[in-house]
Image (tube, grey):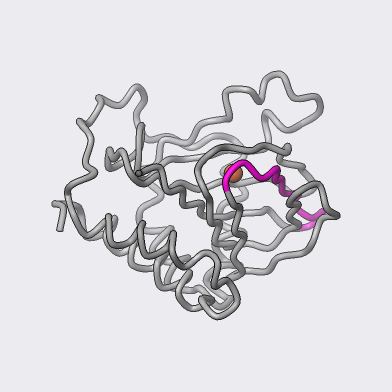
Amino acid sequence: MPDRTKILQRFIDATEAGIRARAADFPDAMAMTDRIFTALKSGDGAAPATPPTRLPARLPVCDHLEAALDHARGGPVPELGAAFAAIEPAFVWFRRPEAAQVAGDFYENHANAVIIGDGGLEARRDVRIGVSLVAPDIHYPRHHHPPEELYVVLSSGKWMQNDNPLVPKQSGDLVHNPPNVWHAMQATGTAPLLAVWCLWTGT
Ligand SMILES: [Fe+2]
């Protein structure tokens, strides 16, 4: 087992438990889930740690964090909400680099943080885990990426895949994106959207 803090291990365990609780509904995502959480028990994928470019800090949109975490703690994944709240003070929140080119209010109204992977609290090559927060009524633009991805929804919102209509997802739901699938999300008018994302970046 890699040498990591108790709060980080708690967050990893709570993320895995949240995913496995829905295994029956998302059988296609379980091979990736096994790869990720088996890898995280070994130090093989560890990468040299890069010095942080910024100190842990929130962005203005993080004012919505408490509401989002209240939602998570009151739903089917309370332990993940509590584990998130415990480790969040260590996060270096950032905006998507491309966000400045997005029209509208997206730039000021979203934030991401990396927990595992390049630029995260634990540097690794094979797994990337992070979180996204989106303010109420804000659309997180469609994007795609080669790594397969699994989101755990902490605070409800609407989700798009393959340019199909947005569908509502509640706290505890999963969103599984096969490699390179277009996807996006939209916070509702009344609640911030908060989700944990897991990417398999190994071979
Ligand atoms: Fe994504």
Residue 16, horizontal then vertical, whole percent = 40, 67
Left or right, residue 67 beside residue 168? left
Q: Residue at x 57, y 66 (%)?
A: 70
At 36% across and 32% down in the image, what residue appears?
119
Most foreground residue, 109 or 10: 10
Q: Position of residue 47 (x, y in %)?
A: 23, 35
Q: How many marks?
A: 0
Which quadrant: the N terminus?
bottom left
Q: Is residue 188 magenta?
A: yes
Q: Main secondary structure of the magenta part?
A: loop
| Most distant residue in the front direction | 203
Asked whether, in this view, residue 89 is left or right of residue 171, the answer is left
Indicate whether 150 appears above or below 92.
below
Q: Is residue 118 magenta?
A: no
| 183 displayed left or right of 81 | right
Instruction: Residue at 59% x, 65% y: name it.
Output: 174
From this view, report whether residue 9 is shown above or below residue 107. below
Residue 143 point in image, percent of width and height: 67, 37
Instruction: Find residue 140 and report its image quarter.
Output: top right
Q: Quarter-wise, where is residue 68 in the image?
A: bottom right
Residues 160 and 147: in front is 147
In the picture as drawn, the residue positioned furthest to the right comes out as: 165
Quarter of the image where the C terminus is located: top left
Quadrant containing ligand 1: top right
Residue bounds of the magenta highlight: 179-190
Give coordinates of residue 192: x percent, y percent. 68, 53
Residue plotted at (62% across, 49% down): 64
Q: Is residue 88 left or right of residue 151?
A: left
